[in-house]
């Protein structure tokens, strides 16, 4: 039976993400091995904290996730999970990102309070499935010190000292720097949109 897989690599806000998806009417399954992803209708990579925390994903998970993406299985990165979609991060140059999005994540400027914690507004860059029915200027909840660049894959930006990618989308690969599970009705809409994209 197909399900949405929630990856547990020891750096996640798994409980709150589960609650967010449950509010959208979906229960998440946690795969025990990379091979279990063959049964996934979609994949969620959560995460909080240091980019180094993504290193355990090298142990078979990277190739299994990339294989799933090649099969058009939707992938959703949340917070640190979004940053892992990119090539690398200034926070841990020795750790590879998934490189599904071009660019490197960098620290937010020292001219503003870091980490960036709290509510901030979204500036829509282009139409997207992930942000369908989410109005421009919507407030969502962030907590991070590093951020991805605004590139052609960016569907919404936010600003804290500089503009950064708040949401990205390329094909069936999606990501948000904010925490949809802590962003009220707007976050719930984002989760519902990803569930719809997964067909789950």
Image (tube, rainbow, N blue to C red):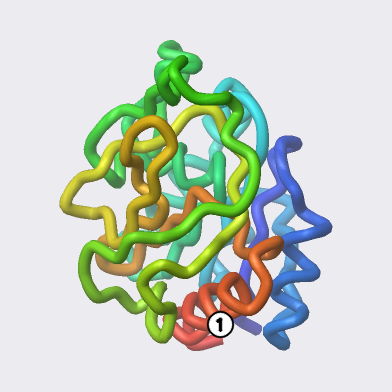
Q: Do we see residue 59 in this rendering?
A: no
Q: Residue at x 77, y 54 (%)?
A: 14
Q: Is residue 98 at least partly visible in the picture? A: yes
Residue at left 48%, top 86%?
Answer: 196
Q: Nearer the viewer, residue 63 or 198?
A: 198
Q: Nearer the viewer, residue 63 or 94?
A: 94
Question: Looking at this view, is 162 or 80 the one in front?
Answer: 162
| Left or right of 44, for residue 93 | left
Q: Residues within 10 Å of mark 1 (few under 14, many from 20)?
A: many
Instruction: Provide residue 82's location: percent of width, then percent of height.
Output: 46, 46
Horizontally, residue 107 falls left or right of residue 13, namely: left
The residue where tag 1 is placed is: 192
Quarter the N terminus occupies: bottom right
| Residue 69 on image: x %, y % | 37, 60
The kind of secondary structure element at disc 1 is helix
Residue 11 position in % (x across, y down): 71, 36
Q: Up-down: is 143 above or below 78?
A: above
Quarter of the figure that contains the C terminus: bottom right
Q: How many marks?
A: 1
Judge left or right: residue 55 versus residue 112. right
């Amino acid at each position: 039976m197909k399900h949405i897989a929630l990856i547990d690599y020891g750096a996640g806000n798994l409980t709150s993400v589960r609650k967010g998806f449950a509010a959208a009417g979906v229960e998440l399954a946690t795969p025990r091995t990379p091979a279990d992803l063959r049964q996934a209708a979609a994949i969620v990579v959560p995460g909080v904290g240091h980019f180094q925390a993504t290193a355990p994903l090298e142990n078979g998970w990277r190739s299994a996730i990339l294989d799933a993406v090649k099969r058009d299985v939707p992938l959703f990165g949340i917070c640190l999970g979004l940053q892992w979609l990119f090539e690398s991060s200034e926070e841990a140059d020795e750790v590879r990102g998934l490189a599904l999005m071009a660019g490197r994540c960098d620290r937010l400027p020292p001219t503003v309070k870091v980490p960036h914690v709290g509510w901030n507004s979204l500036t829509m860059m282009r139409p997207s499935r992930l942000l369908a029915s989410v109005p421009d200027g919507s407030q969502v909840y962030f907590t991070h010190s590093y951020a991805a660049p605004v590139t052609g894959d960016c569907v919404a930006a936010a600003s804290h000292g500089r503009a950064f990618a708040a949401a990205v989308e390329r094909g069936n690969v999606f990501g948000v720097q904010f925490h949809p599970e802590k962003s009220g009705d707007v976050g719930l809409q984002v989760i519902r949109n990803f569930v719809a994209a997964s067909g789950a």
